[in-house]
Amino acid sequence: MAKPKTQFVCQNCGTVHSRWAGKCDGCGEWNTIVEEDPMGGIGGGPSRAPKKGRPVALTTLSGETEEAPRIHSGISELDRVTGSGFVRGSAVLVGGDPGIGKSTLLMQAAAALSRRGHRVIYVSGEEAVAQVRLRAQRLGAADTEVLLAAETNVEDILATLAEGKRPDLVIIDSIQTLWSDTADSAPGTVTQVRTGVQAMIRFAKQTGAAMVLVGHVTKEGQIAGPRVVEHMVDAVLYFEGDRGHHYRILRTVKNRFGPTDEIGVFEMSDIGLREVTNPSELFLGERNAKSPGAAVFAGMEGTRPVLVEVQALVAPTSLGTPRRAVVGWDSSRLAMILAVLEAHCGVRLGQHDVYLNVAGGYRITEPAADIAVASALVSSLAGTALPSDCVYFGEISLSGAVRPVSQTAQRLKEAEKLGFAGALLPASSAELPKSSASRWTEIEDLPDLVSRIAG
Ligand code: TYD
Ligand code: MG
């Protein structure tokens, strides 16, 4: 009898290889390829007679489904990120590093939804029911009607969910613990996770429950990363933050029913996560405005302005190759700004180490921070502090030109609200608000900026 054929699947990205290799061609990760049974998730069960579907005309649907039906948690930082609530019948993946606070966030969400009269089931595959209850007690959620289950087997979970009344929201914590009888691979492999997630999504679609799936992200790719299920779900949220800092950011990566550029900001306390409604105040909290090398960037996260301090340290190097270290920003973007400063402004940093840090462990994703970074660098090199009541934003092009960015008015409004009286911003920014009290300085190009700072 022929030996059943197996396949080799990368546990990080899901690429299928015909033989084992140390490195995955798909994502370039090492030691992520595991032997799996290709029929694991699909075959196995008894064959099913095909069922005839009935197509419906698109036009007949109008009016019925104008707005996706949502369940609101009442936690505004969470609802903003999901697009004002979880959509019924959809699946959301919440990913993040282990220990960042995913279970805490979801237990709080479960409690909030339950208080609003929704039926919530929290299925934990990582902790026993008693442990989950202890956490709920700590979070002040022990008095709610949230149903707890500690299961990891997909068929058992489905049987539990099918029992009793239909749930409005199901939380599966986490997908890495799911295993199904129909898949032969070891728990935690891509085939197992995929089979489990498929079953959960099917349940959500059939019953109209909102499904929240928790997934750990591991750098080593030891267990199936949530990346392999990202395309299967309707929305992907990442919960991130720095262990050294208390605040956490919930960021949308994908959302079929809402915005993808919103963030929710939370602060981890000893009684759980607290909403941070004004993140700028938090990020600027520990500011020492008088030191050289610090510039406040007026950024945007979706519809919300966020002010954060960019810190640079430029110091003569003792090494042959100077160091460039970046925390909270794109290092290739820093290299570009250093090159533009050198090529167009004569600012030579070849003999200097450059360290760049975004305060509070926050991560900036906007190119609009270019001007703030350049200002911080020049300020540190010149040894002169920037005016403490000024914000900076604008994108720098390779030619040294300063490009306008979007939502200028919102950025300036937030800056004014927090007591900043000045701003350095791109020239020809449209929609400049008229304000007699504030000084808006329009910058033509990078040499113009350097001459203003370094004098
Ligand atoms: P947890 O939600 O278990 O993380 P995840 O599910 O993402 O692995 O949270 C883990 C950390 O959060 C843990 O180090 C303890 C801390 N924590 C608090 O600081 N306050 C709290 O109220 C709770 C419940 C947890
Ligand atoms: Mg957890």
Image: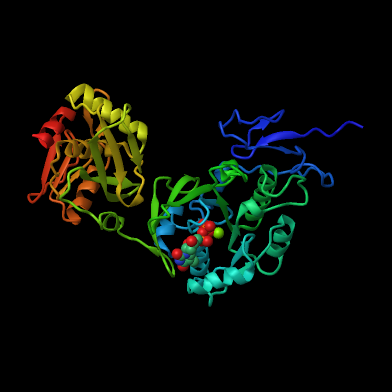
Quadrant of res 78:
bottom left
Who is closer to the viewer here, 242 or 383? 383
Residue 195: image location, x then y, percent: 69, 47
Quadrant of res 229:
top right
Q: Quadrant of the C terminus?
A: top left
As drawn, which residue projects farthest toward the right?
Answer: 1
Q: Is residue 95 visible?
A: yes
Who is closer to the viewer here, 68 or 351? 351
Quadrant of res 297:
top left
Rendered position, 9 above or below 306: above
**What residue sits 31% from the left and 44% below the top?**
357
Residue 51: image location, x then y, percent: 77, 44
Q: Is residue 129 left or right of residue 294?
A: right
Q: Quadrant of the N terminus?
A: top right
Q: Is residue 10 left or right of residue 342?
A: right
Rendered position, 359 above or below 395: below
**What residue sits 11% from the left and 35% below the top?**
454
**What residue sits 75% from the left and 42% below the top?**
42
Residue 91: image location, x then y, percent: 57, 52
Q: Is residue 439 left or right of residue 415?
A: left
Report the colour scheme.
rainbow
Residue 310: image location, x then y, percent: 26, 44
